[in-house]
Amino acid sequence: MNIVGVAACTSGIAHTYIAKEKLMKAGKALGHNIHIETQGTIGTENKLTANDISAADVVIIAADIKINGTERFTGKRIVEVPTSVVIKSPKGLINKIQVELGLT
Amino acid sequence: MDIAGVREIFNERLIDLDMKSVNKREAIEELTDSLYKEGHIIDCKAFVDDVYLRENEGQTGIGNHIAIPHGKSDAVKITSIAFGRTKNDLAWESPDDEPVHVVILFAVRNVDKTTVHLKLLSQVAMALADDATLDKLLKTNDKTEIIRLLSQEMN
């Protein structure tokens, strides 16, 4: 799958980055292409490109707050989860999404 | 990130491998005290109150017996982290409902002139996404290795 996503947490200090890194590691380990943008206290990093988004089969929003720029994902399949779900079981989440989207 | 980078926000004096705390509040206070002694915090009570504001917004346990409480506070003079480990089972809200043995307390200035320190904290957080790193943090008695693990040099 081609996955893009955004991670953001309440204080934008720690969980945002743990969630991003867990999704990246899990996605790569499972053989997917994955790009994750972080929206934290230091601002937006690893900003998704229009090409990333256009090629994506799914958008994972791992956030505990409202994120910026959701209009970029209009027409895309979006999965929204709190950061805790990603931190607990990143591979489980990606596998479940893959099954639900029938992209096996 | 190189190890010199993480040393801007962290050092061996901010690592306690034998905390006496028996619960979450004591652990947060014990680590706050070490930050105070280093001159990184100017008011322990105000800082702990701000850490609890964040605690009330959602769990800071990240599983694997590790928790990352954090406070953004006017009481913080220098953005930094303190690391504590204890044999005691600390009850802590965590995704796997397991007791916590390692507490990594993030102290963040309310207003930082630059984002350098926040960037370092985000990199420490990313190091915590690795299960092998978490296992080592629970076991190693080498404080320099802990600093190295949190600066991702081993990964």
Image: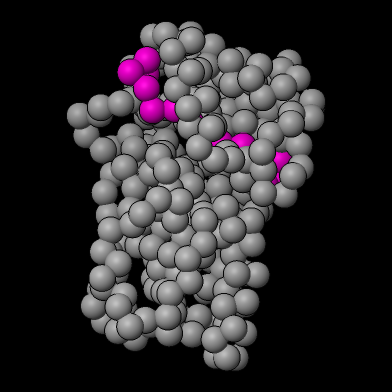
Q: Is residue B63 above or below residue B60?
A: below
Residue B66: % across, % down: 65, 39
Residue B83: % across, % down: 58, 28
Q: Residue at x 33, y 18 (%)?
A: B74
Residue B21: % across, % down: 71, 17
Q: Residue furthest right?
A: B88
Q: Nearer the viewer, residue B59 or B26?
A: B59
User: Considering the image in quadrants, where does the C terminus of chain A appear?
Assistant: bottom right
Residue A103: % across, % down: 55, 90
Q: Residue A2's image quarter?
A: bottom left
Q: Residue B19's image quarter?
A: top right
Q: Residue at x 25, y 27 (%)?
A: B111
Task: Mark yes or no: residue B145 visible.
Answer: no
Q: Is residue B64 magenta?
A: yes
Q: Give the side of residue A98 with respect to residue B54, left or right.
A: right
Which segment is the magenta one?
A: B63-76
Question: What colouring does the structure picture have?
Answer: one colour
Q: Is residue B39 above or below residue B63?
A: above
Task: Mark yes or no: residue B42 visible.
Answer: yes
Q: Give the side of residue B120 with respect to residue A87, left or right.
A: left
Q: Residue furthest left?
A: B113
Q: Give the side of residue B138 with respect to residue B58, left or right.
A: right
